[in-house]
Amino acid sequence: MTAQTQDQFQTIAVILAAGKGTRMNSDLPKVMHCAAGKPLVEWVVNAVNAAGVKRIILVVGHQEEVIRAHFANHAGIEFVRQSPQLGTGHAVDQARPLVAGSPASSELLVLCGDGPMITAGTIGSLLAAHRTARAAATLATSVIPDPTGYGRIARDDTGAFEAIVEAKDCTGEQLGIREVNPSYYCFELGTLLDTLAKVHNRNAAGEYYITDIFHILKAAGRRVRVVDAVPPEEVLSVNSPAQLAEVDDLLRQRTKNHQSLNRTCTPTTEATR
């Protein structure tokens, strides 16, 4: 999808970047660890921009000053703080004051800052599916060989979408599902803001999940679009130094030109080789 096409729509991207990343063995915000010469979150920001989305809100928290400083001169980026961190639904809701003045029909794209493998093409496919279906909410899914740790896509006997079930809340049978949630979402803004108030935290983590929005909307008879639009190689997110090293290798293979890589990352944040 080109920027010219995108300009026909009012689209806002919210990127979740508040986490500390306790398994990273570093006090640096997880999204500011580097892969292939750039902080993880910068790969996501660049993909969003390349898809034609010009307004981006970063939800920050742990050591937010590091993220704010890195993007200080980046046009179109706004910041909002999440504290305390009570889940992805709570994180998105922190952006409410910044988006409240936008038309209710605007599109709100929600992505995670620790998923640097996402591409502009996949974002374009998600937005196109959302618009074609005139959906209240759209979810891009992926079928992967090893779904460990990912939320599963629950479907009924007809194959229709039922809900996203977080890994911690899955039954033994649901853990066998290989269709997963990579956390690529698009919402009708007004619908999302109204529905966030109905999300509860009665789950294993005691958090407010943005994923609950899809089940709530479907139960209310609203149009929910689910599209298998994410190639398996784009699903990998970073939660550990080993995953960071893996993503670093994959992104370097994708760029094919190491000398052109961004040099803003310091040696202490480079992927461990």
Image (tube, rainbow, N blue to C red):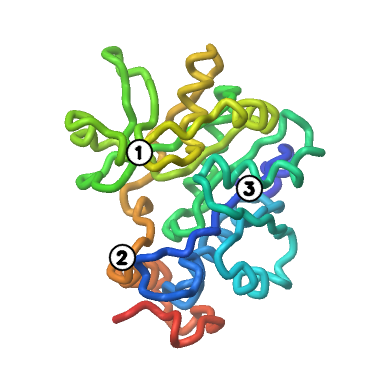
User: Compared to 3, does 249 lie above or below?
Assistant: below
Q: Amino acid at mark 1?
A: Ala
Kindly identify the residue that appears in the image at 60 percent across and 44 percent down. 92
Left or right for 80, reference 143: right
Gap between marks 2 and 1, in whole Å? 25 Å
| Mark 2 vs 1, N-terminal side | 1
Please state which of residues 162 and 44 is positioned toward the viewer in this rendering. 162
Look at the picture and state if 164 lies above or below 68: above
- Residue 196, percent from left and from top: 60, 31
Taking the image as shown, residue 197 lies to the left or right of residue 204, namely right
Q: Residues within 10 Å of mark 3 (few under 14, many from 20)?
A: many
Mark 1 and mark 3 in contact? Answer it, CB < 8 Å: no
The residue under label 2 is 243
Mark 2 neighbour density, 10 Å: few (under 14) some (14–19) many (20 or more): some
Query: In the picture provided, is 33 more to the left or to the right than 223?
Result: left
The mark found on residue 13 in the picture is 3
Residue annotated with mark 1: 204
Task: Point out the tag, 1 or 3, that comes first from the N-terminus.
Answer: 3
Q: Amino acid at mark 3?
A: Ala
